[in-house]
Image: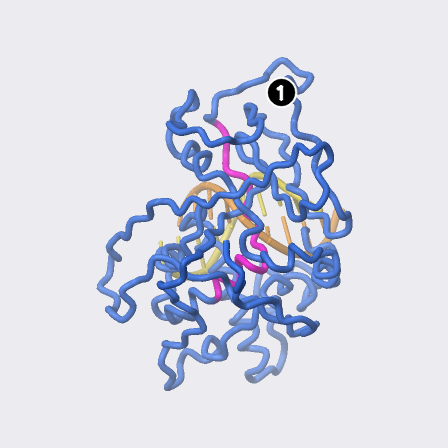
Chain colours: A blue, B yellow, C orange
Amino acid sequence: MREENSNWFAKWEEELPSPEELMPLSQTLITPDLALAFDIQNPNSPLPKTHHQQHQQTAPPLGVHTPSSHPNSSAEFDSAELGGTAGSGGVDEPARTLKRPRLVWTPQLHKRFVDAVAHLGIKNAVPKTIMQLMSVDGLTRENVASHLQKYRLYLKRMQGLSNGGSGNGNGSIPGLSGGGMVDTATDQLFASSAVPPHFLHPGRGNSDHYMPFVPVAAMHHHHQMAAVVGHPPQLQQQYRHFGSPPNGQFEVPFVSRQSHQQVQRMGTSVHSSSPVVPSYVEDLESATAANGRKVLTLFPAGDD
DNA sequence: CGAATAATAT
DNA sequence: TATATTATTC
């Protein structure tokens, strides 16, 4: 549970140093090359143009622990960079058998997700489209599909709750509740981002064309966000704050690479409303309903 | 694509 | 241990 408690968010916000508050979106990034490497079966040196990556040693077959979701610690630099020779013999095992680490859905990432869904509309909000719209590097359709499933469940629950309300909403969900969990655990992520009202009543005379998005194609700065993973086959960490390098050896795994995402045809002739947009601006970070304390910078007027 | 189930992380 | 979150499978 990366949710620790119900105050994870509060802590998170408090922990957020000044600089961090300004870059909520470009905080987690993964090396796309690696992601690509996973898919392709060429563990040798599939990286044609190796970026100045940090020390990336062969990833261990397993044993990858949690990334570093320590909302408490200020500087949690996982020094455990898995020693090259990890004490044991097996040093560099082929990239095969390696799996992508679990994706971490940060509030920002989720916000983007919600925005994308809202933008497309519930009807057209399918994993593929959402993924393409998000333009998040490293994000796969499966990732979105999985999250979408949970998100839909969340919406459904909310619907049922505000609806008749008689009885209970969790009791009808098998395998989900699993015990005592009403709204103080699973919905934390979802709670961080407001859900468009339209989502709750799809069977209404509402058109799905709500767009909180800001397709500023003219924007000169566009930060690309990448999916954050725990420990990639090679090496990757989620550095949240980088204020004081332990040894001046800190490297922000930023990936400003836009990647060449090609648009694929949708299997079904969906609609022709949104011709698709290449990328969007930073997500509009807003205050949290629970806290509602600070309205982060919507637009980094500054620039990159 | 969508839901169920498995695996995994905390 | 139980619970939560994500991945994988059907």
Identify the residue shown where x is 54% and y is 35%. Answer: A232
**Magenta span includes A131:** no
A196 to the left or right of A274: right
For disc 1, the neighbor class at 10 Å (few under 14, some 14 to 19, many from 20) is some
The magenta segment: A97-114
Question: In the rendered image of this protein, does residue A62 appear above or below residue A117?
Answer: above
Q: Amino acid at mark 1?
A: Gly
Total labels: the figure holds 1
Q: Which residue is mark 1?
A: A84
Question: In the rendered image of this protein, does residue A150 appear above or below residue A34?
Answer: below
User: In terms of depth relative to the viewer, which is nearer, A49 or A195?
Assistant: A49
Please tell me whether mark 1 sits on a helix, a strand or a loop.
loop
A64 to the left or right of A217: right
A28 to the left or right of A16: left
Identify the residue shown where x is 53% and y is 57%. Answer: A109
Residue A88: image x %, image y %?
A: 66, 16
The residue furthest right is A73
The residue furthest left is A269
User: In terms of depth relative to the viewer, which is nearer, A301 or A225?
Assistant: A301
Residue A202: image x %, image y %?
A: 41, 78
Residue A111: image x %, image y %?
A: 52, 63
The residue furthest front is A302
Q: Chain of mark 1?
A: A
**Magenta span includes A112:** yes
Image quadrant where residue A274 sits: bottom left
Image quadrant where residue A135 sits: bottom left
A153 to the left or right of A76: left
Residue A244: image x %, image y %?
A: 72, 42
Identify the residue shown where x is 43% and y is 35%. Answer: A33
